[in-house]
Image (tube, coloured by chain):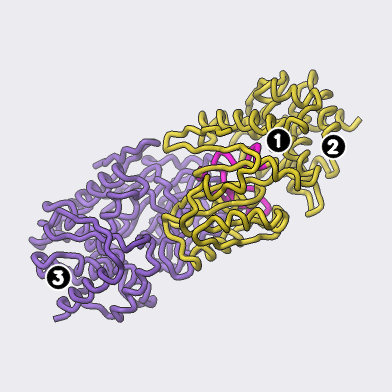
Chain colours: A yellow, B purple
């Protein structure tokens, strides 16, 4: 199945197909110099398959984990492109999760002020969310995604087969992001979760989540307004994530936690039940006040308060600016409830 | 006088006015957190004037010179913005020449994936060229502008009064870039030079050069084709520049040299005469072969050759792709002539 992202400056296709990874050479224009970026948490044969289809490939394998999304690795990729003599008409291919995609995409965005970028996401999290929409970035000084660019991919290949090699906990983290989209925008997607069918109908979950993502990106490429709904659960989520060490919660798990207090009283219990059944956390393992303090530097916190997304009815959202103290108080009250 | 740059995603104004620097507070929206970037070659009162008009200003003064256009300084500016707690609705103001503008513009392009950027160019070179058009970048591994972004300014303030504190050699270097635009696109502008009136009618030179620049940028924001005419003289020019130490030729001087072999036989002698009268170099002080070798890595050199801009008749240009050896041979022959 091919979904299309339509944008003023030229759109692109998302191909969702079991086995499409092996067809990278047919799907993408790799008859040029290609920088293939992956990490050591991704089966090496995925990047090797892509590299074999390239005219000239330079494969860079980064250490797995959020720490790789750094300015130092951005520099490393730029150096690799320079050494491989990539020109403006060459390209970058990401084969990995969100960390690889965000970093490689940012390098592609800046090298010679922007060269072609292909994304082959290999985690559920990146398949349902970060691989589409053109948000690229690195973390800096402990702040997530603070340095980055909007740089749309030329094409995205999503192969649900790769999920079979993914740890179940990673799958659950990805499901949390898909559930997030159902919560704000799609009762049908939410129902798959409520009925416990999300895992068995994973291809459908990917498709529905991406349809929401695409619709949002088409309406608001640069995150002026609507796109913020994708940040549902993310302000607190980022705070929790920032407090974690290497062994802490995954991004999707933090988003799962972050959604709980942003849901109205009528649906919060059901959400917690769904998260529980997916094996996602519903109780904090870090100090709430410390997590809340991170919002003081969150880039979604503009003058006069923090922009929050709330869901009181599944499939509908409320965007509102709350003064920081009020937002914190709301979370304190609702996270306490969650602990009972 | 106000010139308008019209672009699909929203245009911006260029205000050319003697004394406009002192009116920055009226002209720009500085009632927010502002990062003001300048260098120690710019009279400190310029940045101080701008800072005084800001609600909150953080002034960063970099060492003067091309070496400041580095990834390290990009990081330094990002850190400064983070420490000053700039949000997505805050801004960066450049007060300086092309180095300051390119670097500060790139930092503004990437911080939170892009915040507002104002440019107040204080050299003739940046006034007639680099301050308009949204090309931002840093140098990396000895390659100029290899990492960067297209990020248009919100407004550009050009105060010709600041040129009075500029060293005559800097003025000449700026005139070389203006002359470049006359050569490819405007006989009227060229005539000012041919008649020896460029210095006395500097405001007119700035206006005419910017009108060309604006027209080119409007037609080709992302440098897909036409915009390349602005690179007239730049391929060899960058090669010469890359070989220089701190005491070498200025950018505009390198462009002056770079234009000579790209002119047809009918106009080359007149160009050399004009350059001479402006105090610009017409003979190489570096090894020609070494300068030519840099084109092997020039980002304008794509597969199958180097894209060159040639001028055989003033006001008209030819864009063509030449195999590298042919381009080098042409320059060897024509630069030898220039040396006689």
**SS label for mark 3:** helix
Q: Residue at x 77, y 33 (%)?
A: A199
Residue A27: x and y, percent?
Answer: 52, 45
Disc 3 marks which residue?
A: B272
Query: Between marks 3 and 1, how big is the CA–CA gap?
Result: 64 Å
Residue A16: x and y, percent?
Answer: 61, 37
Relative height, residue A317 to residue A245 (above, below):
above
Query: Between marks 2 and 1, how big is the CA–CA gap?
Result: 14 Å
10 Å crowding of disc 1: few (<14), some (14-19), many (20+): many
Query: Between marks 2 and 3, how big is the CA–CA gap?
Result: 76 Å
What span is in magenta?
A126-153
Residue A66: x and y, percent?
Answer: 70, 53
10 Å crowding of disc 3: few (<14), some (14-19), many (20+): many
Disc 1 marks which residue?
A: A177
Seen from the viewer's position, the closer of residues B217 and A337 is B217
Res. B21 visible in picture: no
Residue A132: x and y, percent?
Answer: 58, 39
């Amino acid at each position: 199945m091919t979904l299309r992202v339509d944008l003023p400056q030229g759109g692109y296709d998302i191909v969702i197909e079991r086995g499409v990874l092996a067809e990278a050479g047919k799907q993408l224009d790799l008859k040029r110099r290609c920088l293939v970026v992956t990490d050591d948490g991704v089966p090496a044969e995925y990047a090797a398959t892509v590299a074999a289809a390239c005219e000239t490939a330079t494969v860079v394998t980064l250490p797995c984990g959020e720490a790789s999304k750094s300015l130092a690795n951005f520099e490393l990729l730029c150096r690799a492109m320079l050494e491989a003599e990539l020109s403006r008409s060459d390209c970058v291919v990401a084969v990995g999760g969100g960390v690889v995609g965000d970093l490689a995409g940012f390098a592609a965005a800046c090298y010679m002020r922007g060269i072609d970028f292909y994304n082959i996401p290999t985690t559920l999290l990146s398949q349902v969310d970060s691989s589409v929409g053109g948000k690229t970035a690195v973390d800096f000084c402990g702040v997530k995604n603070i340095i980055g660019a909007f740089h749309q991919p030329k094409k995205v290949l999503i192969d649900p087969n790769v999920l079979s090699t993914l740890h179940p906990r990673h799958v659950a983290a990805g499901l949390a992001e898909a559930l997030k989209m159902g919560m704000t925008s799609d009762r049908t997607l939410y129902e798959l979760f409520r009925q416990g069918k999300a895992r068995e109908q994973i291809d459908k979950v990917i498709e529905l989540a991406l349809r929401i993502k695409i619709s949002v990106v088409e309406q608001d490429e640069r995150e002026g307004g609507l796109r913020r709904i994708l940040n549902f659960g993310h302000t607190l989520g980022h705070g929790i994530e920032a407090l974690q060490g290497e062994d802490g919660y995954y991004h999707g798990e933090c988003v799962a936690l972050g959604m709980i207090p942003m849901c109205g009283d009528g649906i919060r219990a059901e959400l917690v039940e769904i998260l529980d059944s997916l094996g996602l956390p519903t109780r904090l393992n870090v100090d709430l006040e410390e997590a809340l303090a991170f919002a003081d530097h969150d880039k979604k916190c503009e003058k006069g308060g923090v922009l929050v997304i709330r869901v009181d009815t599944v499939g509908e959202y409320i965007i509102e600016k709350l003064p920081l103290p009020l937002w914190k108080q709301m979370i304190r009250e609702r996270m306490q409830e969650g602990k009972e």
